[in-house]
Amino acid sequence: MTAVPATPSSPHVMNTYGRLPIALSHGQGCRVWDVNGREYLDALGGIAVNTLGHNHPKLVAALQDQVTKLIHTSNYYHVPLQEELAKLLVERSGMTNVFFCSTGLEANEAALKLARKFGHDKGIERPEIVVYEKAFHGRSIATLSATGNPKVQAGFGPLVEGFIRVPINNIEQLKAATANNPNVVAVFFEAIQGEGGVNPMHMDYLRDVRALCDERDWLLMIDEVQCGMGRTGKWFAHQWAGIQPDVMPLAKGLGSGVPVGAVVAGPRAASIFAPGNHGSTFGGNPLAMRAGVTTIHTMEAEGLLANAATVGAHLKAGLERALAAELASGAVKEIRGQGLMLGIDLSKPCAALVQRAADAGLLISVTADTVIRLVPPLIMTTAEADQVVAILCPLIIALLKEAV
Ligand SMILES: *Cc1c(COP(=O)(O)O)cnc(C)c1O
């Protein structure tokens, strides 16, 4: 391996990310190494993607086998692995049918189309969809219009119309914003907002919105792209509230690193699309499906839902202990989230911590300016969680002591 300079440059790759001066070379479990041989503990998991960590023997073997059979065919033909993965998702969600695509925004785009056609099918010509402040649904023109972050939207207007925006966890404001509006067709949100700062929807709120959607004949559409696939300790985060959505976009952790997106639909949304209404060239290709099937089987064989719950609780408790004084003083505002989707909300911007943590051998992210986000592989051990606390908390405490 050739050593890379401290700041690797990419003169030919479009400049769309503020990247750290690190180039990763390989990984094993929850650890990755850069091209200079430095080791990092991975508490980011490719942003909630690497469910099984890196170089998982079962996933690697399954993908190697699949590559020799078929990588891609086309949706002109039946793809038996689609039926296999769809069945696994349907059984675990209690829903009924699945459309496959490759990314999160594509899954959300399909959900938005479903909602609009649901409206048109019952004579609503200008359907409107309720979305939320601080939401993140992707970067296509429609999904960035649904996103509640002015930074994501700036420079890309005119935005797509037909969205009504409300704050999270306030059922009265949802009712007020939709009062006497016959064009509303759906309510669309993340069960735990990811990019917006790890903001969970309250259980009561989830149940209230479900009831309202039933009462008004709206689709309840829950974006589980980040919080789904076992991350919170249940297959899907909304299951903690004992409810079921009508439409559920998935992606990120579904293929454990191989791009796979899916829209899972319940009975009210399963038959809205007919042939010709929607499609995706890569969607549901055999390689991606094999990754999804193997991810789910391996999660079950290794008890990763339970692991996400216990290691997540252990990690949260460890953070609370190490930051007890800062929590008491308000310098750390809150540690929130569930399972292995945790956010540490500081009283000041903390983007600088991403580089400092990497320098100390830990990969993390910071979102919404002040929130440290931990979304590690679901195979993380309690010993590794302890190591996250040991590396991260002194850096947080030092940052909080610096003059602004
Ligand atoms: C990441 C994310 C998306 C977008 O997924 P892409 O695969 O990047 O298109 C959509 N919704 C949520 C909640 C996400 O976290």
Image (tube, helix red, strand yellow):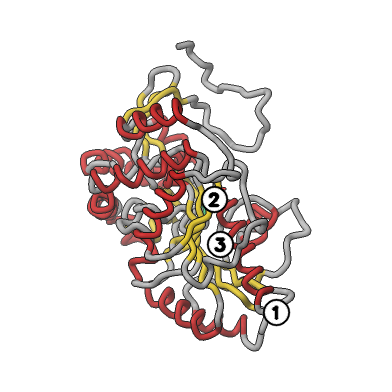
Give the structural element (helix, strand or loop) at label 2. Answer: helix
Q: Which residue is identified by label 2? A: 104
Q: Which mark is residue 134?
A: 3
Residue 342: image location, x then y, percent: 37, 53
Residue 62: image location, x then y, percent: 36, 32
Identify the residue at horizontal 35%, vertical 25% (top origin).
Answer: 39
Give the structural element (helix, strand or loop) at label 1. Answer: loop
Q: In terms of depth relative to the viewer, which is nearer, 168 or 218? A: 218
Give the mark nearest the N terminus, 2 or 3. Answer: 2
Q: Which residue is identified by label 1? A: 123
**Can you tell which of label 2 and label 1 is closer to the viewer?**
1
Identify the residue at horizontal 32%, vertical 28% (top origin).
Answer: 28
Residue 53 visible to an observer of this rendering: yes
**Which quarter of the picture shows residue 316?**
bottom left
Residue 132: image location, x then y, percent: 57, 67
Q: Which residue is situated farthest in the bottom direction here?
A: 180
